[in-house]
C-alpha cells in the first residue's frame, strides 16, 4: 500500500515538473494587436529620461508588426530588477492602456513578472532608438 502511494506521489511530481518545463519553454508572443486598434505608443527612454509619443500610422504599423511577429521564450524572473531602455506603452482609440512592457535590447523584453528572450535578435530596437534621434533634430 505504501509502495503504491510512493509511486503515485513520484508520478504526480514528475507530471508537475514536466508541465512546468513545457510551460516555461513554450514560445509566446508579447502582443497580439492589430495596428489599426492603436491610437498612440509612448516610449520613455530609461537611459536618457527622454520620451516620445508615436502617432504616425506607418511608425505604429512598423513597431506593432515587428512585435506581433517576434516569438519569445521566458528567460528569467524579473521581480526585483530595475532599470530599462524603453518603457513602451500602447494605447487604444479610447486612450486606454492596452499593453505596457520594457524593451531592453534587440533580444530582451521585460513584461513583469518575466524577462523574455528572442535569441534571433528580431526585436527592432534600433528602429525605436532612431525615432528618438529624429525627435531630437
Image (tube, rainbow, N blue to C red):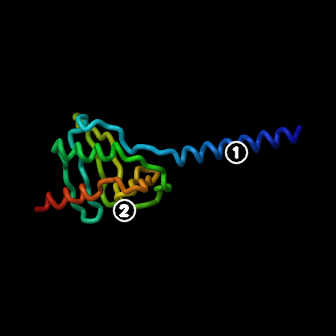
**If the image is split into quadrants, where does the N terminus sit?**
top right
Find the residue positioned furthest to the right.
Answer: 1
User: Where 98 sits versus 85, above or below?
Assistant: above
Name of the residue lying farthest toward the bottom: 48
Please give left or right for residue 86 compared with residue 117 in the image.
Answer: left
Res 83 label: 2
Label 1 CA crowd tier, 10 Å (few <14, some 14–19, many 20+)? few
Q: Position of residue 10 (x, y in %)?
A: 76, 44
* Quarter the C terminus occupies: bottom left
Q: Residue at x 67, y 41 (%)?
A: 15
Residue extending farthest to the left is 137
Q: Considering only order in the chain, which callout, 1 or 2, is on the residue closer to the N terminus?
A: 1
Please state the horizontal and vertical placement of residue 124, each as a whole percent of the image.
29, 54
> At which x and y percent is residue 120?
40, 55
Q: Distance between the residues labelled 2 and 1?
A: 37 Å
Q: Name the residue under label 1.
A: 14
Q: Which of marks 2 and 1 is in front?
A: 1
Which residue sits at x=82%, y=43%?
A: 6
Which of the pair 78/127 is nearer the observer?
127
Q: Locate residue 46: give its quadrant.
A: bottom left
Q: Residue visible at 21% across and 43% down?
A: 40
Which mark is drawn over residue 134? Answer: none
Quadrant in which residue 8 is drawn: top right
SS for tag 1?
Answer: helix
Residue 16 position (above or below residue 110): above
Measured as percent of width and height from the top left, residue 51 is found at: 21, 56
Residue nearest the observer in this picture, 85 or 79: 85
Q: Please tell me whether residue 93 is drawn above or below residue 80 in the rendered image.
A: above
Amino acid at each position: 500500500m505504501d509502495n503504491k502511494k510512493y509511486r503515485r506521489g513520484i508520478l504526480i511530481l514528475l507530471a508537475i515538473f514536466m508541465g512546468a518545463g513545457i510551460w516555461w519553454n513554450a514560445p509566446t508572443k508579447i502582443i497580439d494587436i492589430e495596428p489599426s486598434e492603436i491610437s498612440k505608443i509612448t516610449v520613455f527612454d530609461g537611459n536618457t529620461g527622454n520620451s516620445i509619443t508615436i502617432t504616425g500610422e506607418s511608425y505604429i504599423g512598423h513597431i506593432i508588426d515587428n512585435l506581433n511577429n517576434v516569438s519569445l521564450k521566458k528567460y528569467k524572473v524579473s521581480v526585483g530588477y530595475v532599470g530599462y531602455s524603453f518603457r513602451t506603452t500602447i494605447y487604444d482609440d479610447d486612450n486606454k492602456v492596452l499593453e505596457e512592457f520594457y524593451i531592453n535590447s534587440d533580444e530582451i523584453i521585460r513584461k513583469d513578472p518575466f524577462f523574455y528572450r528572442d535569441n534571433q535578435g528580431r526585436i527592432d530596437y534600433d528602429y525605436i532608438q532612431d525615432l528618438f534621434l529624429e525627435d531630437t533634430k
